[in-house]
Image (tube, rainbow, N blue to C red):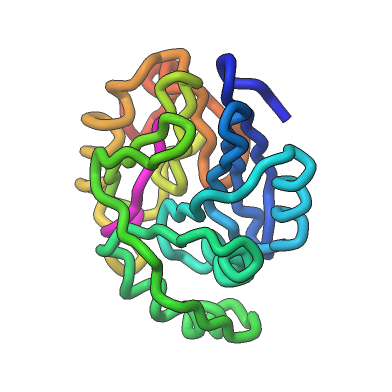
Amino acid sequence: MTSEGARLVRKSFPVGPLQCNCTIVGDLLTGRALVVDPGGDPERILAEVARMGLAVAAILHTHAHLDHILAAGHIRAATGAPAYLHRDDLFLWRSLDQQCAMFGLPPVRLPDPDQFLVDEADLGCCGGVVLHTPGHTPGSASFWFEEAKLLLAGDTLFKRSIGRTDLPGGSFEQIVHSIRDRLYTLDDDAVVVPGHGPETTIGEEKMANLFVRA
């Protein structure tokens, strides 16, 4: 677990068949937490939340590709916390069983999200806000925690790379706009947790990312 500011704690770890980075962000004062991108291994996620002494307030998804949502139903059933997704990715959410078939995984069906993410909306926990960052998918969202200088970027921005735009609903022009005009305006020393792989910072990517330069 790593501390971010006086109240916030954060733990990120890979889960599921495609090793998506799941992140738990918690507020030590209220004891409430956000689970972001539960892409598998629900028992491990729940165990980490319990180990941190937190209760899940909401389940957030940066987008609706299967590797970011596979455990959403299990976490929702176990905690009673509402699941959030941007409306523009609902078509992907509802096609989860087809996505699973493409990867040779057992079919999984999820109830529709409880609420939809809205650009710049307050997450109601941990001081987080929604940034709608389409490009990888139409409804891709990032989550910004200003106090902690923490960005959960999903599959929009990676260390020295960007998300794929050749999948249904993807757009290279949109992802470049999302990164350059939304993410690169954040603090240079902000830590970026991508959907997969190692962490980076906004400043590093502005200088060294060959796909989108500042």
The residue at the point 69 percent across, 25 percent down is: 2
From what the image shows, is residue 206 above or below residue 176?
above
- Observer able to see residue 207: yes
Residue located at (67% from left, 42% from top): 54
Label count reads 0
Along the viewing direction, whichever of 177 and 60 lies nearer the viewer: 60
Q: Is residue 14 left or right of residue 83?
A: right
Q: Is residue 179 above or below residue 43?
A: above
- Residue 159: percent from the left, percent from the top? 52, 33
Residue 185 sits in quarter: top left
| Nearest to the observer: residue 161 or residue 196 | 196
Relative to 128, is 182 on the left or the right? left
- Is 76 placed above or below 19 here? below
What are the residue bounds of the magenta stretch?
A: 136-144
The quarter of the picture where residue 101 lies is bottom right
Residue 84 on the magenta span: no
Residue pictured at 22% horizontal, 30% vertical? 181
- Front residue of this view, candidates 133 and 41: 41
The answer to whether residue 141 is magenta is: yes
Image quadrant where one finds the N terminus = top right
Where residue 206 appears, as percent x and y from the top left, is: 37, 21
**Residue pictured at 60% horizontal, 70% vertical:** 77
The answer, for residue 214, to whether it is visible in the render is no
102 relative position to 1: left or right: left
Instruction: Locate the C terminus and report the quarter of the image it occupies.
Output: top left
- Where residue 136 sits, quadrant-wise, is bottom left
Q: Position of residue 63 (x, y in %)?
A: 41, 57
Residue 10 placement (x, y as % from top left): 62, 32
